[in-house]
Image (cartoon, coloured by chain):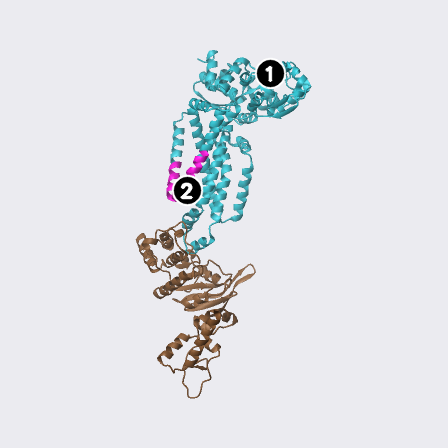
Amino acid sequence: MIEFENIGKKYDDQNALKNLTLTINDGELFVLVGPSGSGKTTLLKTINQLVVPTSGTVKVDGEDVAKTDLRQLRRHIGYVLQTGALFPNLTVAQNAAVQLDALGWDKKAKEDRISALMAKVGLPPKTFLQRMPSELSGGEAQRVGIVRSLAAKPKLILMDEPFSALDPVSRRQLQQIMIELHREIDATIVFVTHDMHEATLLADRVGVVYHGALQQVGPPNEVMANPANEVVRQFFDAESSGDRLLKQVLVAGLGREKQPGETPLKVRNSQTVFEWAGMLERRADQLIEVDGRVLTIHDLLNYVARLGEESDHDQ
Amino acid sequence: MITINELSTYLAKNGNEILQALWQHVEISLIAMIITILIGVPLAIALVNHQRIGEVILQVAGVIQTIPSLAVLGILIPFVGIGTVPAVIALVLYAIMPVFQNTYAGLTNIDPVLMEAADALGVSRRFKLFRIEIPLAMPMILSGIRIATVLVIGTATLAALIGGGGLGTYILLGIQTNNNAALVVGAVLSAVLALLASLLIKVLANVSFKKLGIGVLVVAVLGAGVGLGRQLLAKPHETVTIAGKMGGEPEILINMYKDLIEQQDPAITVNLKPNFGGTSFLFKAVTSKQVDIYPEFTGTVLQSLVKTSSGVSHDPETAYQDAKHDLQQQFKMTYLKPMKYQNTYALAVRSATAAKYHLKTVADLARVAGQLDGAFDPDFYQQADGYPGLKQAYHFNLRSVRTMEPALRYEALADKRVDVTDAYTTDPQIRRYHLVTLTDSKSFFPPYQGAPLMLANFAKQRPEVVTALNKLAGKISNADMQEMNYQVTVKHRKAATVAHAYLKAHGLVN
């Protein structure tokens, strides 16, 4: 568990973080999301004290990080940077084992662990272990970066915009790897991104950071459907069009008043039209109730038809 | 110019000495570089996180580098003496700038993301320094070391000026005695050495860090072993250090001193430092006890070293007595009895010029001075007993006058680029270029007789040395000296051989 209590950070006269309080639970993949310069990376770095907050405390498993042996703490925290940040003078194997060396793992255990992780992220160990970072593509380097962060079996992994610099194909592959890894390993992951799509794809919960303050915390679809304020709404606007939430069906002007005698299925506005279509497939006359409005199969057909018109206009 | 033939003859004759000088050069440069690296690299590492101090050190190192190396050598003599030590110190002072600067820049220019990664992963301080920072800065560090090495090998030629030896000895000798073969040998070898060293470092750059470290360690241990062994093997001899000014004549003289002293007392080892430097350099070296003896001229003593109230006498005996007295009074120095020959100034012209204008004396020259161009050595051009006094005494003015290196002015005269130069009466070039020296009928030039100069204390403690050197009193005529100079500087025979031959012929040694 990570507890931020009234975290503030000042650079000269600028407040990078303003009195921010947040708790991240064990085992969850928590995504800090927000535009660049919002303070999300600064917040992330207070966890391993790469940034020392001006005020407030950060606790990892109940222990104030400002009072612990920093080097020991960091050796047990996985860290992934934007560009992979592999040391260019060390081989892939040496890079991946940096924390294991610091922790004094023996050679055999080290090699086994790294090889297993390499295979897991899709880099055949035989081919890659002895390569130099200069011989890797951006995606490959970042995979090694992930292996390095996982090597010491950390309970906590920090990822600072790890996929932002990658091409779309690599990014999608790595996001998929992340989803699988999160399922397999029992670690808390704090993930920073400015990409809303990535946030909604990966997060158990997101925290929206803007101007150094936490705007809203919650599961991504909840936040998307019920933005706490204008800032969050605008931020999610572009993203929600892709996700097709029931909320957007209502915004499009569809749905009607509930009529007496009807017993529609109550659903959350953060559920998607795809889930809705699934229900209708099982029972074509299923009515659903979203935020007090009733939606029928006709509304779905109508909504999909309008989407078609929209994309025609786009062309 | 110089022919391949001359060069190969010179190499064949002096091969051993040249090799020794080459090794000496390598030794001085290597020691200087090892010290430089041992200081520069750790200093930069220590200061990388103290930016302000780092900048200050950069400034200081930069300033040191702007001081001419010759001046640094001069400043160091009173503190650390002469020989290899001050040469190495001066070289280190020069080389430290590029090494420190490049190491500092290499360490501070590492991608901050990598430093952040290292911190975030919790690596140990040692791992961060030795596995990440130094390897990443290594190309910069090595290029700094390469620059410094080339600089050191080049500058090490100046070590010869203060008795440090090395290839510079041949460059100085070449300039001083107009011996192009020596000049070429010294210059080319030091250039080749610099290139090879630069290449070697480039190659070593691709060797792994570990192997490099082991290699350096092995070389250091071997070097220390050899040095220690040499010291242990060296017998506890009494040594007397004798230095001479630039040129062949002083070298012949100090070789005679050596022969005479070692014959007088075989227990004494005489250490010779030929081509050691100019007058003030040598004089300082004696007062600071770095050199025990050097031959000096009465005229020079009176003109440049002591303060005289009475002016310089034109009678040789009076001049010697004045010089001896003033040296004793003002510097507590003993000036032994002079040799016979006079190495005084004279004006020299080509024999064709002399014939054309009927020149025999300086007074003859005064008649036609307005049609002649002169080239003088800088001392002669400035000193009161040189050109300024001479033109007053004889009332003349040359059409033009420029200053020129002593060794070059004869060539300029022979090539008809000038018509008049100053000359020393024992210079072999007078014979070589068939020059005519003009008689100083007004006895304007002061007498210049050579005699050994030393501290009075030294003379008191070493009566046997004094006895040995006094055997030369009143010996060696002008013609003898001219002939010996001719043998050494024109015929390129060894000074030691020529000196020994003279002593033997005159029954001064067995």
Q: Which residue is mark 1?
A: B352
Q: What kind of residue is marked 1?
A: Ala
**Sequence-wise first label, 1 or 2:** 2
Using the image, determine if residue A196 lies above or below residue B501.
Answer: below
**Is A219 in front, or is A302?**
A302
Instruction: Please report the bounds of the magenta region as a residue range.
Output: B193-220
In magenta stretch: residue B197 = yes
| Mark 1 vs mark 2: in front | 1
Q: Quadrant of residue B451?
A: top right
> Residue B18 location, x and y as percent?
44, 26
Classify 10 Å Cα crowding around label 2: few (below 14), some (14-19), many (20 and above).
some
What residue is shown at x 46% (from left), y 50% (from top)? B110
> Residue B340 location, x and y as percent?
55, 13
Q: What kind of residue is marked 2?
A: Ala
Q: Secondary structure at mark 1?
A: helix
What residue is shown at x 48% (from left), y 77% (from top)? A252
Q: Which residue is mark 2?
A: B205
Q: Secondary structure at mark 2?
A: loop
Q: Is residue B345 visible?
A: no
- Label 2 resides on the chain identified as B
In the rendered view, does A309 fall on the left or right side of B430?
left
Using the image, determine if residue A214 lies above or below residue B445.
Answer: below
Classify 10 Å Cα crowding around label 1: few (below 14), some (14-19), many (20 and above).
few
Q: Is residue B383 visible?
A: yes
Q: Which hue is chain A drawn in?
A: brown
- Label 1 resides on the chain identified as B
Which chain is depicted cyan? Answer: B
Is the magenta region chiefly helix, strand or loop? helix
- Cα separation, mark 1 vs mark 2, equals 62 Å
Mark 1 and mark 2 on one chain: yes
**Residue B320, label in figure:** none
**Is B231 in front, or is A10?**
A10
